[in-house]
Image (cartoon, grey):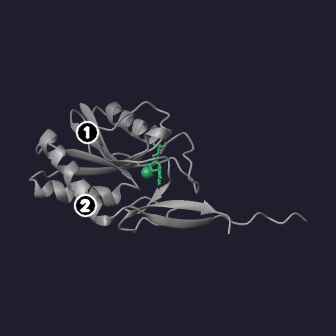
Amino acid sequence: MTPSPPATQARIDTALFSASRIRERVDEIAAGIATDFGDDCRIVAILKGSFVFVADLIRQLSERNVHPVVDFISLSSYGAGTESCGTATVRGELSLSVKGRRVLLIDDILDTGVTLQTARQLLLDNGAADVRTCVLLDKPARRVVPIKADYVGFTIDDVFVVGYGLDHDNRYRHLPYLATLSLTAP
Ligand code: IMP
Ligand code: MG
């Protein structure tokens, strides 16, 4: 009988961005958004990966007297692997109307672009007047769909990253920093 292949093991490598570096950068992004949007800021964040980023961002916005209305949509394009499957499935509906609104769409990371593009189109189909996009991380090397984010935290190489809300197979979201993940045979 052929033995089954050894299970893949995930290993957290060195931190890519520390908690304090992330805090600094989130503050800078909030400053840009506050200047561009003023207090008319309707946020739609993509679950699950963006929840930590958005939680910090809205509190930094509040320090700048911007009090956004926040909604979430759930989209997923990954299974248990580290490769996007090429389509994004919308799993939840918008609970607040975006009709006629300027919307700031937020995700954790812009990879192939399929997720952000699908979400952006969903907002436009629901009558949003304008959709700006904001991502904590951008991996331009992997882009399949021609989309650019208006606000980007960090541009990174083609590495798989976990922590600060980003997961691998639903783990590591709790890490306060961002780190690369290696998948190796045991
Ligand atoms: P896209 O549709 O390929 O742009 O993928 C975007 C989604 O894939 C993001 O919302 C993330 O949830 C997930 N993703 C992409 N790259 C990574 C990564 O390096 N770590 C964790 N999740 C990732
Ligand atoms: Mg995601």
Residue 168 appears anywhere in the view: no
Q: What residue sits 55% from the left and 40% below the top?
A: 86
Q: What residue sits 25% from the left and 47% below the top?
A: 43
Q: The residue under label 1 is which amino acid type?
A: Val
* Left or right, 120 with reference to 181: left
Q: What residue sits 11% from the left and 43% below the top?
A: 38
Q: CA distance from mark 1 to mark 2?
A: 29 Å
Residue 12 appears anywhere in the view: yes
Kindly tell me whether mark 2's CB lies below 8 Å from ligand 1. Answer: no
The one nearer the camera, 168 or 120, is 168
Q: What residue sits 38% from the left and 36% below the top?
A: 122
The one nearer the camera, 149 or 71, is 149
Q: If the image is split into quadrants, where does the N terminus sit?
A: bottom right
Considering every residue shown, the one lying at the far left of the view is 65
- Secondary structure beneath dot 1 equals loop
The one nearer the camera, 39 or 165, is 165
* Dot 1 crowding, Cα within 10 Å, few <14, some 14–19, many 20+: many
Q: The residue under label 2 is which amino acid type?
A: Arg
Vertical order, 106 against 22 (above or below): above
Q: If the image is split into quadrants, where does the C terminus sit?
A: bottom right
The one nearer the camera, 95 or 129, is 129
For residue 77, the mark is none
Q: Which residue is mark 2?
A: 23
Q: Position of residue 21 (x, y in %)?
A: 28, 60
- Secondary structure beneath dot 2 equals helix
Q: Quadrant of residue 130?
A: top left
Q: Which residue is mark 1?
A: 98
